[in-house]
Amino acid sequence: MLVAPSILSANFGRLDEEIKAICGAGCDFVHVDVMDGHFVPNLTIGPVVVGAAAKVSSKPLDIHLMVENNTFFTELFAPLKPKYLSFHIEEEKHPHRLIQKIKSYSISPAIVLNPHSPLSSIEYILEEIDMVLLMSVNPGFGGQSFIPSSLKKAERLRKMIDSAGLKTLIEVDGGINDKNVYDLKNAGVDIVVAGNYVFGSPSYKNAIDSLRV
Ligand code: DX5
Ligand code: ZN
């Protein structure tokens, strides 16, 4: 299992130290939650702060956009060269076009599905993306409880990807800890995002290691 701590639960007063700490503790990606106060009822950080974070990170960024205007935000964050740039399918009228735009910056495109969104909504563009991010909480806040139906969804997505002969990765985000990570592993998930679990732990290394099942 690959591990992407979400800096939403970090201490923003000393963000550089927090990022260095999770990178030093062996995370695989640094998950960055970008919220615009419109698509979700919360507001986080923009390219100035994320750019500063990128400078101190020794691990690739995994940027999760939770915004209304995906094209505008893609153009804002593309110069930071994240490994993944994820956008929500619920908020995009032209996902295929946006995917091509993200690829034009040599960034790996990913699509995010809210808990209610069906897998069928990405059936015909699955081959165009490198990762699917399944939300296992309603987006907007850290520290919420894992929604159990996310597990069945991950299992079905795994079958969908495998039967199409694709290499698309599955990432799951929200309410993940050292207990439910085993079920996610069995469901065929590749990457877990964890905010509160990692940053709320006295040892970031122990927390990250416990998710690497
Ligand atoms: C929620 C964010 C998540 C969140 C995860 O909108 O996308 O990345 O910070 O935090 P935990 O692990 O605390 O649920
Ligand atoms: Zn996220």
Image (tube, rainbow, N blue to C red):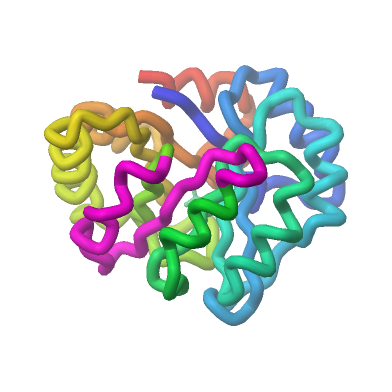
Residue drawn where x is 42% and y is 59% of the image: 96
Q: Is residue 33 magenta?
A: no
* 174 or 171, nearer to the observer: 171
Q: Is residue 116 magenta?
A: yes
Instruction: Magenta stretch: give its range.
Output: 103-129
Residue drawn where x is 12% and y is 34% of the image: 163
Instruction: Judge whether 210 appears above or below 66 on screen.
Output: above
Q: Is residue 145 visible?
A: no
29 left or right, relative to 59: left
Residue drawn where x is 43% and y is 63% of the image: 95
Q: Quadrant of residue 59?
A: top right
Outermost residue toward the bottom in this view: 38
Quarter of the image for the C terminus: give it: top left
Instruction: Judge whether 204 appears above or below 199 on screen.
Output: above
Instruction: Judge whether 56 appears above or below 173 on screen.
Output: above
Count all numbered tags in the image, as a single digit: 0
Quarter of the image for the N terminus: give it: top left
User: In the image, residue 187 lies at what x, y percent?
Assistant: 20, 34
User: In the image, residue 21 lies at what x, y percent?
Assistant: 74, 27
Instruction: Judge whether 27 appears above or below 100 on screen.
Output: above
Q: Is residue 183 visible?
A: yes
Q: Quadrant of residue 37?
A: bottom right
User: In the image, residue 122 lies at what x, y percent?
Assistant: 28, 57
Residue drawn where x is 85% and y is 51% of the image: 13
* 6 or 201, nearer to the observer: 6
81 left or right, relative to 167: right
141 left or right, relative to 121: right
User: In the image, residue 10 lies at what x, y percent?
Assistant: 70, 46
